Structures are given as C-alpha cells and as structure tokens.
Image (spheres, rainbow, N blue to C red):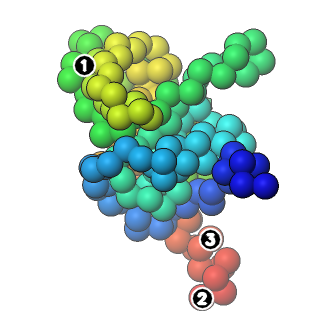
C-alpha cells in the first residue's frame, strides 16, 4: 500500500573513523523538498536507534549541510526533534562549559571539550522556513558538535596530537582487520 511504503522510515548505516568522508566540508542544500524531508526523518530514526541526541548528514554518508537533534530525555519527556538545514551560528556566548563528548562515528571514545555554553543559530526548518534559535546547555553543545561535523571537524581534533594519533591508528587497524586487508 503506497501510504504505508511512503510512511515507513529506514535506519541508515553510520560511517565511522577512519572513513575520509568524515573530513569533508559538507555542501549547502539548494532545495528543501520531499526527498530531503525523507532523509531528515531517516536520520532522526537512525539517531533514536543509536541511541544519540544528534546526527549530521555526513555521518550517514551524505555530505550536505543538514543535521538533526533531539535532547529530550526519552524517560521523562516527549520527543522534541529539531531539523536544521544550512545552519549558521550567528552569536556565541562568552561563557564556556565543559562536556565529556562522545561521537557515534568514533565509538567508545570520550573527549572533555570546553565550548561556549550559549549561542544563536540561523537555519531553514524542514519546510524551508527561516528560523532563529537561541540555545544553552546541552542543546548548545549538541549544535556545536553537529556543526563541527558539517565542517569535517571531529571530537578527536580537541585531543592532543599524540592521543589523536593513537586513536586514529587503533581505528585504522580495526578497519584493516574487518576488511581482511
Ligand atoms: O553527532 C554525533 O556523533 C552524536 C553525538 C552528539 C553529541 C555528542 C556530545 C554532546 C552532545 C551531542 C552523540 O554521540 S549522541 C550520544 C549522546 C547521548 C547523550 C548525551 C551525549 C551524547
Ligand atoms: Zn559526532
């Protein structure tokens, strides 16, 4: 039945280190159409399944400037999904706050990162409408983490060079073992 088919979403594979695509600068989106909305919905389903509170399109191998976020606590709150198309941070607060960040594309690695604790971001929503959002706390951290993905920046870039090289070597070795190379 066409309606069922259209409404069914799909889980997308999340790419991981050392996939070079993660280092791409994602391209702006020209058209907000049904195909893009379908990708955003598939990204949300993939994020909830991971589970995660954010996901950038490049993490599902689509290097376009699209991200999804939902920081609602699923134990106590209803979902509160946010879709951001061509997001731009227009203001960053002066106060910094540390957070021990993980990344769905770099499993089992945690990095304590200090980021501005508040920001204002401009973006297009899933209907292509201009939006402005002021965020603080975990939402501000998540927006900055996902925006980093759109510019090919990863949490390991906040590590010392030595620790980053150790992590990258470990993921490259794991990838070789998996492909039997
Ligand atoms: O983009 C991603 O890899 C998903 C990230 C997003 C994120 C990381 C750190 C801080 C905020 C957002 C996470 O892996 S989602 C997993 C998660 C769940 C609860 C709290 C923090 C991170
Ligand atoms: Zn990430």
Point 55% across, 48% down: residue? 38
CB atoms of marks 3 and 1 within 8 Å: no
- The Cα–Cα distance between marks 1 and 2, rounded to whole angstroms, is 45 Å
The spot of residue 1 in percent (x, y) is: 78, 55
Judging from the image, what secondary structure is the residue with disc 2 in? Answer: loop
State whether residue 37 is above or below residue 143.
below
Q: Residues within 10 Å of mark 1 (few under 14, many from 20)?
A: some
Q: Is mark 2 within 8 Å of ligand 2?
A: no
* Residue holding disc 3: 174
Residue ranking furthest to the bottom: 181
Q: Residues within 10 Å of mark 2 (few under 14, many from 20)?
A: few
Q: Which mark is residue 112?
A: none
Q: Residues within 10 Å of mark 3 (few under 14, many from 20)?
A: some
Q: Nearer the viewer, mark 3 or mark 1?
A: 1
Q: Nearer the viewer, residue 15 or 37?
A: 37
Quarter of image, res 41: top right
* Residue holding disc 1: 92
The spot of residue 114 in percent (x, y) is: 38, 25
The spot of residue 50 in percent (x, y) is: 69, 44
Quarter of image, res 124: top left
* Residue holding disc 2: 181
Q: Earlier in the sequence, mark 2 or mark 3?
A: 3
Quarter of image, res 120: top left
Judging from the image, what secondary structure is the residue with disc 3 in? Answer: helix
Q: Is residue 95 visible?
A: yes
Point 41% across, 13% down: residue? 136
The spot of residue 37 in percent (x, y) is: 50, 44
Point 25% across, 19% down: residue? 92
């Amino acid at each position: 039945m066409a309606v069922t088919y259209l409404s069914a979403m799909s889980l997308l594979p999340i790419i991981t280190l050392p996939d070079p695509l993660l280092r791409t600068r994602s391209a702006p989106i020209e058209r907000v159409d049904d195909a893009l909305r379908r990708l955003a919905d598939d990204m949300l389903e993939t994020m909830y399944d991971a589970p995660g509170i954010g996901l950038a399109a490049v993490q599902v191998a689509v290097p376009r400037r699209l991200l999804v976020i939902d920081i609602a606590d699923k134990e106590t709150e209803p979902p509160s999904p946010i879709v951001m198309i061509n997001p731009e941070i227009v203001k960053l607060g002066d106060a910094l706050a540390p957070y021990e960040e993980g990344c769905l594309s770099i499993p089992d690695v945690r990095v304590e990162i200090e980021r501005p604790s508040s920001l204002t971001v401009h973006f297009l929503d899933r209907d292509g409408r201009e939006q402005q959002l002021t965020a603080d706390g975990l939402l501000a951290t998540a927006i900055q983490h996902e925006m980093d993905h759109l510019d090919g920046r990863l949490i390991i870039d906040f590590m010392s060079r030595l620790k980053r090289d150790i992590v990258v070597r470990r993921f490259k070795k794991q990838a070789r073992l998996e492909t039997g190379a």
